[in-house]
Image: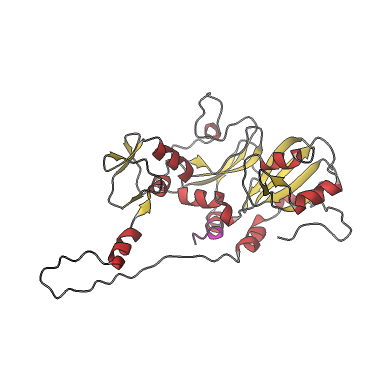
Amino acid sequence: MEKKIDSSGVIKAKKHYEEKSAASRSESSHNKKTRFTRSSTESFAQSRAKISLKKSSPRAQQNKEDQLTRLNKVIADSGITSRRNADDLIQQGVVKVNGKTVTTLGFRVSPDDEISVNGNPIPQNIKKIYIVLNKPKDYIVSVKDESNRQTVMDLINLKSRIFPVGRLDRNTTGVLLMTNDGDLSHRLLHPSYEIEKTYAALLDRNLLEKDAKAILAGIEIEGSKANVSELFIDPNNTRKVYLTLNEGKNHEVKLLFEMLGYKVKQLDRKAFANITASRLPKGDWRFLTKHEVFQLKKMVGLF
């Protein structure tokens, strides 16, 4: 996406940025992606011999392997947790396949395998749920907290199991997606899909033009450059900055400004992909529309 600096070098502010349709940005970011699908046709040669001691052909072996699915994906698809947390559960030794503990990451299972987590069989054929929450301050983005602090789950009055898509700091507010669709969650967070996230940051002082240009040029954080595709300064308050990134590193926005000597006093996520929290008061949530879910899946090659 083209960096937003005009010919005079002045950073432009964008009116009603919160209401901007992220769908147009997202489509331009992803319309060049190629979706790769795997398909195979099974063919079995009939042996003329009445008794055959031959091993399975490489193609037959491949067809059998194509029917297997990574264990962490199956757990995530059951709605228990995300793929990343499923890997943690596997390493902790609380996952069993057909009664045997599996601790190997990347382990594959067939549709007929019986899988349990902490002794409980994983749910089958669950209804997929997609939610956007306008996260308020002082809530932990986690399914549960060891210190018994308030979590975002306390704001969702659903019996179905869901989990947050990614993280927001305790003091960061704004758009938080929640679901029980592990495959979609995994892809939305994977850096290869470059899903855009837009933030409004309130700084401790006015952002200088040279620093704004440096941010757009790319500030190195922990060995790699932060990829900021858009940056706008509020004309009514030049301490308030809107910026769009297509990465998801921890504390990235705060670290970005700290590298230039600024402190972020407030941080609010305005959009995740094409989803905003406009018209949602802090602490409220809603189900995503079918169109919104379709657009999310289209971005990451699930449609």
Q: Is residue 299 magenta?
A: yes
Residue 201 quadrant: top right
Q: Residue at x 24, y 71 (%)?
A: 44
Specify the farthest residue to the top: 147
- The residue depicted at 49 percent of the width and 40 percent of the height is 163
Q: Which residues are magenta?
A: 297-302
Q: Please state the total of marks drawn on the protein image.
A: 0
Q: Is residue 119 shown in magenta?
A: no
The quadrant in which residue 38 appears is: bottom left
Q: Position of residue 289 (x, y in %)?
A: 55, 52
Q: Position of residue 89 (x, y in %)?
A: 41, 38
Work out which quarter of the rendered image holds the N terminus and state it: bottom right
Which percent across, then down, holds residue 176? 59, 42
Q: Is residue 8 above or below residue 283?
A: below
Residue 4 visible in the snapshot: yes
| Residue furthest to the bottom | 48
Q: Is residue 71 left or right of residue 144?
A: left
Query: For this view, does 58 lie left or right of residue 15?
Result: left
Location of residue 284 (image quadrant): top right
